[in-house]
Amino acid sequence: MFQRILIANRGEIALRVIRACRDLGIEAVAVYSQADRDAPYVQLADRALCIGPASGLESYLNIPRIIAAAELADVQAIHPGYGFLSENPDFAEICRASNFEFIGPPHEAIRKMGLKTEAKAVAKAAKVDCVPGSDGPVDSDEEAVHLARQIRYPVLIKAAAGGGGKGMRVCQDESQLLANLKAARAEAEAAFKNPSVYLEKFIDRPRHVEVQILADNHGNCVHLFERECSVQRRHQKLIEEAPAASLPARARDRMCDAAVRLAKAAGYVNAGTIEFLVDQEFNTYFIEVNARIQVEHPVTELVTGIDLVKQQILVAAGQPLPFKQKDIAIRGHAFQCRINAEDSDHGFRPSPGRITHLRVPGGYGVRWDSQIVSGYVVPPHYDSLVAKLLVHGMDRDQAAAIMRRALDELEVEGIATTTPLHRRIFRNPDFLAGRVDTTWVERVLLASKGE
């Protein structure tokens, strides 16, 4: 087992890994930028090292500085968290070449799964259904036009090297396709340093459902069932839940079995997520792999009782998974609300600043994953996520009731947060009935307020 681990991240996920290390009797070494010098996660680590100024490029994305910190702290492994370098295959390769175990998948698997076109090829070879579209990047406008005529409009342009909606365009006809290709390539180049795009058939009002997998170095691979992430705004998730609402058993089984096949075909090890779209007839289509722990992993922890971050560390240390597929079951229902430092009542504008008052909800079935405290200054330099509010109940209705109570208890003053939007959602009859899709927030909820 490792004696000491460096956490190459910040904020809530750094604190999450620190806690897992404490449970396993492992020393946790944090890194921080100058903007995070007084952050609570830094104070709770066994040791903390400054790696640069506030800019992510000069700190949390600076590979030489992180490797130098790992050498100085004499660690045996590096946990990348999510975001920043977590899905950078070069970082994973450099870690291992520098004799630090990378707590994540092999760099070859990250590289293979990081390009959606390559991931799609692996999926097809593993007999996993994909959204109809191009087998690889479309290199010319002529090729795009020809393919779009084959799969029929509407079609979706997507960046081959990334996600989060960057480089994504819906095209209803040929004129829109030609107009959008150049813009999508430019946006993909700016976001991912790779202008490649590919085409998919556009699925109207789909649900976004993902399957959590765990694989070890001994040939074992299991799924931990699914999470639903359909409540989104501009392709950014707002709420996650497990299990997915009103999903037929046949669709769940099909996705979960496909996720394990795909992971095995890719030579995947450690924790990861296989993402699918589900259409209105419950057909399921693979879309991408997230080769890391995800923001929403605690939802799965609540319904399975399995600590995913601990399992990441144990797998990286060479230990086999301590359970088989038959040992894993869903118990109850869980929700997660992402509490972001954004003003959801005024166009989701960023709201960094000092938290002057904080009241954290508690009670039966409530979990609060956050590093914020009263007096903490939310910096403007990073992602706006400040907390994850989770609940667990015997069923979906009970979990929703607990979440309403928890959201009403939550008080954050000094900055604006997305809490008011979450309160609206958990009182909305469509959401409570499970009648949502990836367009629902903007098409229905925000449209009703004229946003």
Image (cartoon, rainbow, N blue to C red):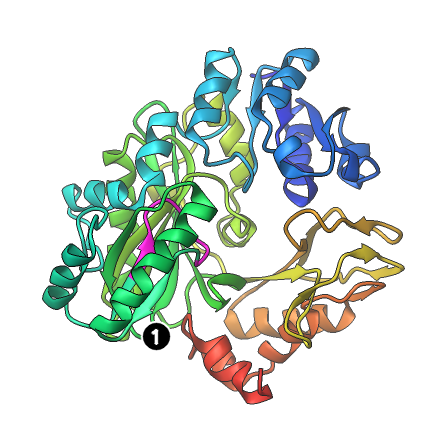
In the rendered structure, does residue 160 fall within the stretch colored magenta?
A: yes
* Relative side of 189 to 350, left or right: left
Residue at the image point whose x is 63% and y is 41% from the top: 13
**Residue with the mark numbered 1:** 205
Q: Is residue 220 magenta?
A: no
Please, what secondary structure does the residue beneath circle 1 have? loop
Instruction: State left or right for residue 309 relative to residue 167.
Output: right
Q: Quadrant of the C terminus?
A: bottom right
Residue 333, horizontal then vertical, whole percent: 51, 63
User: Residue 23 sits in which quadrant?
Assistant: top right
Of 186 and 214, nearer the camera is 186
Q: Which residue is depicted at the point 25% across and 45% down? A: 117
Per the rendered image, the range of residues in magenta is: 157-165
339 sits left or right of 149 in the view: right
Query: Can residue 297 be seen here?
Result: yes
Do we see residue 225 in this rendering? Answer: no
- Amino acid type at circle 1 is Arg
Residue 146 locus on image (x, y percent): 11, 61
Rendering quarter of residue 170: bottom left
Q: Along the horizontal axis of the image, is 189 left or right of 34?
A: left
Q: Is residue 204 above or below residue 314?
A: below
Q: Could you tell me which residue is drawn at 51 percent across and 12 percent down?
A: 98
User: Foreground residue, 6 or 271?
Assistant: 6
Q: Position of residue 61 (x, y in %)?
A: 59, 33
Identify the residue shown where x is 46% and y is 81%: 443
Q: Position of residue 29 (x, y in %)?
A: 70, 24
| 213, above or below 5, in the image | below
